[in-house]
Image (cartoon, grey):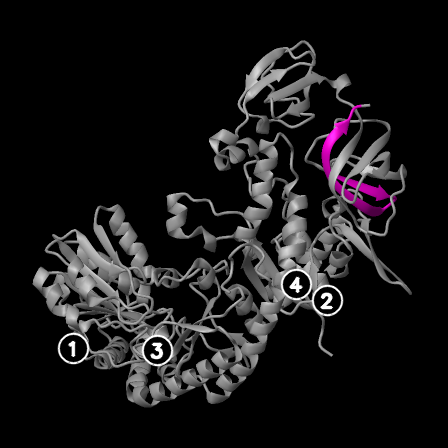
C-alpha cells in the first residue's frame, strides 16, 4: 500500500463521512426544496449537516452556505464582497491560494487596487503591515488562516477591529486550518470564512462559505433561492452530509488527533534531518500546522524526488501541481524569500487523520535513501537549478 | 529478481507510445515520461486559464500509460531546452547558418539531461520511439555498440542520433528499430491505442507555425540582426535584405530578386551581411569541412580518405565520399562525384553501409 502523505492536497475519506454518504445512497432521490416527504428527508439531512459544520467553527447554521468547494467559496467571498462595495481596494497577501490570487488579478484588471503583503521568511504576515494597508477605500481584507504549502498560522484575531474601523469586509480562507486547529468565527471576528470538505475527510466537490450577514454580499451563481439565496442550485446533498459527518468527527477527535499527528511529524522531521545533511524546514517551528512539513532537500530537483518517491510508494507534493503533471516553483516559497533553485528543491509532506506510525517509519526508511540516490544521479550542471 | 526499469520518453505520438507498450510487453518496468520543453505561449488569456493544464499530447501519452498499466509523469526541462537547444538555434541562424535542433535536442536533452532524470528515478535505461537500431558486439575486449539505420529506410532517423557514443548507446533502447511505420501503426491499433492514426509531426516543436525568421527575431537583440545585401557572384547588389537569418544555403524562394533564371542562395557571408545567390549550376560543392565531429566508436581509425557515405541533410540520399579526420573533432569529407549545395550548420553523418560511423556539423563547403 502506498504511503499517502499529501493530506493538504486532499485527505482520504473519513469513515464517518463514508457512512453518512452510504446512509443516503438508497434514498429515492429527494430534492431538499421539494414538498414531498423524500424532499423533507433530504432537507433534514442537509440541515443536520449544516449544523454540524456550523458547530465546528462556532457559527450559526444559517450562516453556513454550501458551495462546490474551497475555490468557489473564495470566489464567492471575493466577488460577492466587492460587487456592491464603495471601496476599490482589496488587501491580501502574496502567499494565498490560487483561488484567491486569480480572482484578485481579475479585480485588478477591473480597476481595483490590490495590496499583496509579503510575508517574512517563515511565511508570517505582520499584522502591522496589514493594518497599515487598510484604509477607508478598502472593500475587503482576505487572508488565509494557515498556509497550504508551509503551514504557517497567521495571527488574524487582532485585525478584526481594524477592518471594522475602515468598513472593510474580513474574509478568512480557513480551508487548511479547519479540523486541524481550533477555529472560531467569533474569536477571529471575520465576516466570511472558506472551508473545504476534502481537506478534512469529506469528498472533493463540497465546500462552505461562512457568511456572517448575507445582506452584505452578492451571489455569483444566480438561479433559485437555495442556500439563503447566496448560491443557486440544488445542493450537493451527499457531499454536504459527508462534510457534516467529517466536521463532527474532526471536532470530536481534534485534540487527540492533532497531538498524535504532531508527534509523528516531529519524528519524521527529526529522522530526516539526521539522515539528510543540509535539510531545511520552510516555515516556523511553532505557529505552524503540525501536520505540514515543507522541506528543502539539498542537491536534488524536487520533481525528480517526487517521481522517485512515488515509484517507491511514498506520495507527497511540490508547489501546486497542474493537470499536465508538471510543477511550477512554489509562489509561496518565492514570496518567503527562497530562490527559484530552493523552491525547485522543496517538497511538501502533509500528514493527516489516516497517517499511522508504521507509515511514518516506512517513509523515513524510504525518503532518505531515495534522496541520496537522486542527489548522486543528478549533478547540477545547468547553473543554479537546484539548491546546494 | 525485479524487472529492469526503463524510462521511456513519450511525446503522445504513435511511435513513442508503441515503443513503451512493446517494452512493457517484454517485461520491463516501464516508466513513461513526457518532457515539457517549449516555452508556453504567453497570451494573457491562456495565462489566466493555465494552458499548462491542457497539453493534449501529454493526455494521449497518459492514456497509453493507463491502458498499458505503467506509471507516467511529466517533467519540466524547459530551462535546459532553452539554454541548450533554443539558444543554439537562434544564434546559429544569426550567424547565417541553418541549425538542426532535433540533433541538438537528442544530444543535449533526450540522451543527456533525461538520462540524469532516469538515474534519479532508478532507471538503468532510456528508450525512445526513434527509428534506428543498436547492436552490441561482445568480445574479449568488452562490448562494442553499433548504431545502425532503421529497417524501414523511409523512416530511418539514425541521422539525428550520430552524437550517441558508446556510453549513451549502452544505456539506450530503440524498440522500433526493426519495424516499419505501417507495422507500428498496426501494432498501435491492435493494442487499442487511440493515437494509432495520429498524423506525423513535421515542424520544429518550438516553432509550430514554421516561421523561423520571426521566431529568431523575437529572441534576438536588435544589434544581432545582420541586415545587408543580396549579391550575385560578381558582387553586384540585387536587393537588400532584413537579416542573414532569413536565408539558408540552397534556398530559392523569398530572395526578393527578379532574374531571368532561377537563383539560389549559394553562400551567406555573415560578417559582411551578404547573401550570395547564383544559378543552380553554380551551387555544387566538392565536399565539406565538419566541426564538432564525434565518432560512434572512438576506436574507429579514420585513415586518410576512408571510404564512407555521407548524409548532409535528413531528407537527402547518402553520397559516396571519403573521410579524413583533421583533428580529434574536425573532419574533411570529399564527395566521390560532385555533390549538391552544402548548408553550414546542418549535421553531416558518416555511414558505412547501414552503420553510423559518426558525424558532425557542417562548417563550410569545399569548392575545389
Label 2: which residue? B25
Q: Which residue is mark 3?
A: A285
Q: Is residue B177 left or right of residue B52?
A: right
Give how far apart the Cα atoms at labels 4 and 1 are.
54 Å
Q: Is residue B123 left or right of residue A299?
A: right
**Which residue is rendered at x = 36% and y = 72% of the image?**
A283
Q: Residues within 10 Å of mark 3 (few under 14, many from 20)?
A: few
Residue nearest the observer in this picture, A58 or B227? B227
Q: Which residue is mark 1?
A: A187
Q: Nearer the viewer, residue A93 or B45?
A: A93
Q: Mark 4 falls within which chain?
A: B
- Nearer to the camera, B349 or B298: B298
Q: Which residues are magenta?
A: B348-367
Pointer 4 residue: B7
Same chain for mark 4 and mark 1? The answer is no
SS for dot 2: helix
Amino acid at each position: 500500500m502506498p504511503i499517502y502523505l499529501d493530506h493538504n492536497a486532499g485527505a482520504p475519506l473519513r469513515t464517518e463521512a463514508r457512512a453518512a454518504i452510504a446512509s443516503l445512497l438508497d434514498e429515492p432521490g429527494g430534492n431538499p426544496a421539494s414538498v414531498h416527504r423524500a424532499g423533507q428527508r433530504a432537507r433534514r439531512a442537509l440541515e443536520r449537516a449544516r449544523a454540524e459544520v456550523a458547530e465546528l467553527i462556532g457559527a450559526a447554521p444559517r450562516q453556513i452556505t454550501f458551495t462546490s468547494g474551497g475555490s468557489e467559496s473564495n470566489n464567492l467571498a471575493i466577488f460577492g464582497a466587492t460587487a456592491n462595495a464603495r471601496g476599490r481596494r482589496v488587501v491580501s497577501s502574496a502567499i494565498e491560494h490560487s483561488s484567491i490570487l486569480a480572482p484578485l488579478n481579475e479585480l485588478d484588471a477591473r480597476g481595483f487596487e490590490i495590496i499583496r503583503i509579503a510575508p517574512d521568511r517563515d511565511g508570517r504576515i505582520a499584522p502591522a503591515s496589514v493594518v497599515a494597508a487598510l484604509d477607508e477605500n478598502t472593500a475587503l481584507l482576505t487572508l488565509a488562516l494557515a498556509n497550504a504549502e508551509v503551514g504557517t498560522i497567521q495571527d488574524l484575531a487582532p485585525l478584526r477591529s481594524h477592518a471594522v474601523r475602515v468598513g472593510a469586509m474580513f474574509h478568512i480562507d480557513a480551508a487548511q486550518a479547519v479540523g486541524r486547529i481550533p477555529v472560531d468565527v467569533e474569536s477571529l471576528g471575520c465576516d466570511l470564512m472558506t472551508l473545504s470538505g476534502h481537506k478534512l475527510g469529506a469528498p472533493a466537490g463540497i465546500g462552505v462559505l461562512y457568511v456572517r450577514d448575507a445582506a452584505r454580499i452578492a451571489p455569483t451563481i444566480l438561479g433559485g433561492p437555495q442556500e439563503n439565496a447566496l448560491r443557486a442550485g440544488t445542493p450537493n446533498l451527499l457531499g454536504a452530509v459527508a462534510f457534516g459527518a467529517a466536521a463532527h468527527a474532526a471536532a470530536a477527535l481534534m485534540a487527540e488527533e492533532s497531538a498524535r499527528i504532531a508527534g509523528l511529524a516531529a519524528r519524521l522531521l527529526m529522522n530526516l534531518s539526521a539522515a539528510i545533511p543540509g535539510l531545511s524546514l520552510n516555515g516556523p517551528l511553532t505557529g505552524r500546522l503540525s501536520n505540514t512539513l515543507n522541506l528543502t532537500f539539498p542537491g536534488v530537483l524536487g520533481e525528480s524526488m517526487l517521481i522517485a518517491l512515488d515509484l517507491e510508494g511514498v506520495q507527497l507534493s511540490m508547489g501546486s501541481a497542474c493537470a499536465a503533471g508538471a510543477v511550477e516553483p512554489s509562489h509561496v516559497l518565492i514570496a518567503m524569500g527562497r530562490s527559484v533553485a530552493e523552491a525547485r528543491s522543496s517538497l511538501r509532506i502533509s500528514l493527516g487523520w489516516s497517517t499511522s506510525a508504521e507509515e511514518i517509519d516506512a517513509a523515513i526508511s524510504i525518503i532518505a535513501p531515495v534522496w541520496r540516490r537522486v542527489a548522486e544521479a543528478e549533478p547540477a550542471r545547468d547553473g543554479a537549478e537546484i539548491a546546494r | 529478481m525485479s524487472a529492469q526499469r526503463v524510462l521511456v520518453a513519450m511525446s503522445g505520438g504513435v511511435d513513442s507510445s508503441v515503443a513503451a507498450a512493446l517494452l512493457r510487453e517484454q517485461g520491463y518496468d516501464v516508466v513513461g515520461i513526457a518532457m515539457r520543453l517549449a516555452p508556453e505561449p504567453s497570451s494573457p488569456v491562456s495565462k489566466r486559464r493555465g494552458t499548462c493544464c491542457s497539453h493534449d499530447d501529454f493526455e494521449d501519452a497518459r492514456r497509453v500509460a493507463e491502458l498499458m498499466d505503467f506509471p507516467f509523469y511529466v517533467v519540466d526541462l524547459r530551462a535546459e531546452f532553452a539554454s541548450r537547444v533554443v539558444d543554439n538555434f537562434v544564434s546559429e541562424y544569426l550567424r547565417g547558418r541553418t541549425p538542426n535542433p532535433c540533433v541538438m535536442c537528442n544530444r543535449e536533452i533526450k540522451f543527456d539531461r533525461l538520462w540524469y532524470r532516469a538515474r534519479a528515478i532508478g532507471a538503468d535505461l532510456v528508450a525512445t520511439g526513434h527509428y534506428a537500431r543498436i547492436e552490441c558486439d561482445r568480445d574479449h575486449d568488452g562490448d562494442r555498440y553499433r548504431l545502425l539505420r532503421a529497417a524501414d529506410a523511409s523512416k530511418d532517423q539514425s541521422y539525428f542520433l550520430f552524437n550517441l557514443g558508446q556510453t549513451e548507446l549502452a544505456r539506450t533502447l530503440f524498440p522500433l528499430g526493426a519495424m516499419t511505420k505501417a507495422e507500428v501503426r498496426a501494432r498501435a491499433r491492435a493494442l487499442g491505442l487511440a493515437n494509432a492514426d495520429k498524423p506525423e509531426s513535421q515542424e520544429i516543436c518550438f516553432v509550430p507555425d514554421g516561421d523561423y525568421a520571426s521566431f529568431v527575431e523575437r529572441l534576438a537583440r536588435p544589434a544581432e540582426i545582420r541586415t545587408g545585401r543580396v549579391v550575385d557572384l560578381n558582387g553586384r547588389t540585387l536587393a537588400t535584405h532584413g537579416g542573414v537569418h532569413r536565408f539558408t544555403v540552397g534556398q530559392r524562394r523569398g530572395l526578393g530578386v527578379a532574374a531571368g533564371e532561377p537563383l539560389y542562395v549559394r553562400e551567406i557571408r555573415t560578417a559582411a551581411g551578404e547573401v550570395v545567390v547564383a544559378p543552380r549550376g553554380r551551387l555544387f560543392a566538392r565536399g565539406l569541412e565538419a566541426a564538432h565531429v564525434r565518432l560512434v566508436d572512438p576506436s574507429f581509425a579514420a585513415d586518410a580518405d576512408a571510404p564512407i557515405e555521407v548524409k548532409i541533410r535528413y531528407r537527402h540520399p547518402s553520397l559516396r565520399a571519403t573521410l579524413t579526420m583533421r583533428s580529434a573533432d574536425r573532419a574533411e569529407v570529399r564527395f566521390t562525384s560532385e555533390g549538391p549545395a552544402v548548408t553550414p550548420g546542418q549535421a553531416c553523418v558518416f555511414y558505412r553501409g547501414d552503420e553510423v560511423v559518426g558525424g558532425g556539423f557542417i562548417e563550410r563547403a569545399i569548392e575545389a
